[in-house]
Image (tube, grey):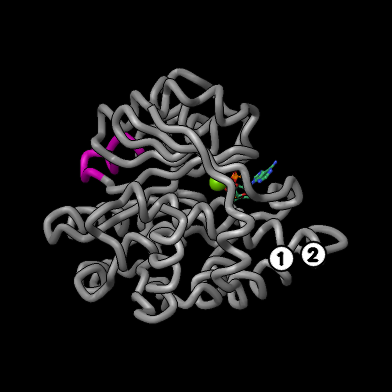
Amino acid sequence: MQEQLWNIISAVKTQAPLVHNITNYVVMNNTANALLAAGASPVMAHAHPEVKDMVTIAGALVVNIGTLNEYWVESMRLAAQQAQTSQKPWVLDPVGAGATAYRNQVLEELLQYKPSVIRGNASEIMALVKTTSQTKGVDSTHQSQEALEAGLDLSASTGAVVCISGATDLIIYQNQYRSLSNGHPLMAKVTGMGCTATALIGACCAVYSKDFFTATLAAMALMGVAGEIAAEKASGPGTLQLHFLDALHGLNKEAFLSRMQFSGTT
Ligand SMILES: Nc1ncnc2c1ncn2[C@@H]1O[C@H](COP(=O)(O)OP(=O)(O)O)[C@@H](O)[C@H]1O
Ligand SMILES: Cc1ncsc1CCOP(=O)(O)O
Ligand SMILES: [Mg+2]
């Protein structure tokens, strides 16, 4: 299994898939740099006249609702619809789900286009399932284990792979799940780390579209191992961000296989 995950990470480097992102203003630059460092080719595009064409030529679509407005929501609808029609992998990041009624309403609509993968933190995944649940904003107030039941429900109701990130990452598909315990607490002190995880899931799904569960595991293992290596060199969030890009870029098979820690399936 670990070898298979490394093969997916390597395929991102050799194939350099085009990953189309409709993401938020906060993280566009981090996300594009992380995709490049991992070997993928990012493009950010949200203009209505071009989104469908961009989805058509991309290997995967990533939709992130971090900084919404009506124009962007329509971009997301057009892109998600095109991804569904053309059976292109697409990944949804429900940033801030449960914080406002508007976010919940937009998410309900986007879920109709059947994302391949949904990646959020524990509070967001819980809010997606129980829409009356109020969240604080974009950061989680729950541990990923607390959202496991919601994640299982969400995967069953949407047919998507669900990833709940946090100190432990849970990757769920229907009634099976695996946990990854790599990473470092400093990662939560850099904005856009979750968004980066979602974008890397897009890159892995683009090169491994036959199995989104395994592709998501690969992306989250890459995040965790790179985050851990970066944290060993960093003196705080600022340098973590720099070292994280370098770790994504320089990661080799030996370091990946020796550090990766995953467990569990039911
Ligand atoms: N306490 C932690 N220990 C280890 N890794 C963490 C921790 N918190 C977050 N991460 C990692 O940081 C990345 C972003 O996750 P998270 O902070 O849950 O997303 P978000 O930014 O969307 O809230 C994931 O790869 C996750 O594994
Ligand atoms: C702070 C903030 N506000 C709207 S989007 C955003 C970025 C959230 O990024 P992440 O969920 O990856 O930390
Ligand atoms: Mg997030």
Q: For this view, does 227 lie left or right of residue 198? A: right
* Residue occupying the point 44% across, 78% down: 13
Q: Which residues are magenta?
A: 107-114
Q: Position of residue 164 (x, y in %)?
A: 49, 38
Q: Ligand 2 closer than 8 Å to the CB at disc 2?
A: no
Circle 2 sits on which residue? 238
**Res 241 label:** 1
Q: How many marks?
A: 2
Describe the element under mark 1 as helix, strand or loop.
helix
Report if the CB atoms under discs 2 and 1 are less than 8 Å apart: yes
Q: Position of residue 126 (x, y in %)?
A: 47, 26
Task: Identify which residue, 113 or 226, lies in the foreground.
Answer: 226
Q: Quadrant of residue 119?
A: top left
Q: Position of residue 133 (x, y in %)?
A: 50, 20
Task: Identify which residue, 14 or 110, lies in the foreground.
Answer: 14
Q: Is residue 125 magenta?
A: no
* Residue occupying the point 43% across, 59% down: 5
Q: Quadrant of the C terminus?
A: top left
* Residue occupying the point 44% across, 67% down: 9
The Cα atoms of the two marked residues, 2 and 1, are separated by: 6 Å
